[in-house]
Amino acid sequence: MPHDLHPRLLRGFVATAETLHFGRAAERLHVAQQALSRDVRTLERLLGDTLFLRTTRSVELTAAGHGLLPKARRLLALHDEILSGVAHRPLLLDLNSDVTGPDLTSDRLLQRARAAWPEGELLARFHGGLAAAAAELLAHRLDVSFGRYAGLPARTRDRLAQRPVRLEAVSVMMAACHPLAGRPALRLAELAGHPVDICAGNPAT
């Protein structure tokens, strides 16, 4: 009885073959390592052959794995080419607030984006807080967000792609008697050692 070969199994195999590391391959595919290992074992049972030599310290392709790799790449490329003609799902943007700045309101931002991608569909929400939005991005429940990328934890930044869209001045409020209050401008380093609240009333930021 013939068996269906799901593209997910081939993607897991290719990612593991290219990284020779189940953990890194799982990170690339945004899946749990156990799920990836299970998919590779399923593919091996389906093909009736061992694709990887696994030890506690290394992962290597077998002869069967080397033979499958170029075929799997071609099949996945054809699969993606076929799906590229299918209509895209709506792109979900988190604008954080209904106003993105004095020179670029959220309405204008959406108008520009829709003009640049007329064949697509954009949906906007105003959730607020890049830290919360980052978790949604990593879970693939959100496509784009705006905010101060540098303020995210390093582990989160490593898993996201970012592009600067504008420079924005930041103000600091303090008591008039504070030692730094009389200065016309401050460098960020001058705030070292001074308690600073950056939440602005929103615990998600």
Image: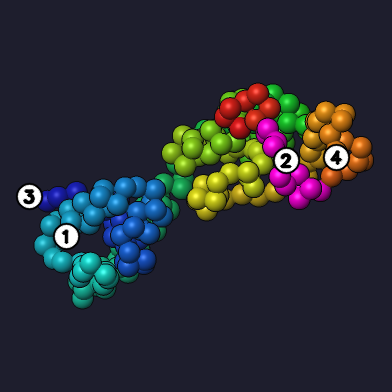
How much space separates mark 4 and mark 3, taking CA atoms? 78 Å
The three-letter amino acid code for the residue at tag 1 is: Glu
Residue 58 at what x, y percent from top left? 27, 70
Question: Of helix, strand and loop, which one carries label 4?
Answer: loop
Mark 1 burial class by Cα count in 10 Å: few <14, some 14-19, many 20+: some
Q: Nearer the viewer, residue 46 or 80?
A: 46
Query: Who comes first in sequence, dot 3 or dot 2?
Result: 3
Mark 1 touches mark 3? (CB < 8 Å): no
Check disc 2 and report its element: helix, strand or loop.
Answer: loop
C-alpha separation, residue under disc 1 versus residue under disc 3: 17 Å
The answer to whether residue 161 is visible is yes
Q: Quadrant of the C terminus?
A: top right
**How far apart, in angstroms, are the residues tagged by discs 2 and 1?**
58 Å
Residue type at numbered disc 3: Met
Is residue 100 shown left or right of residue 40? Answer: right
Of mark 1 and mark 4, the one earlier in the sequence is 1
Residue placed most toward the observer, 47 or 155:
155
Look at mark 4 in the image and give the residue it sits on.
180
Cα separation, mark 4 vs mark 2, equals: 10 Å
Closest to the observer, 7 or 60 = 60
Q: Are marks 4 and 2 in contact (CB under 8 Å)?
A: yes
Extreme residue toward the left, this view: 1
Q: Quadrant of residue 40?
A: bottom left
Which mark is on residue 1?
A: 3
Q: Which residue is mark 1?
A: 44
- CB atoms of marks 3 and 2 within 8 Å: no
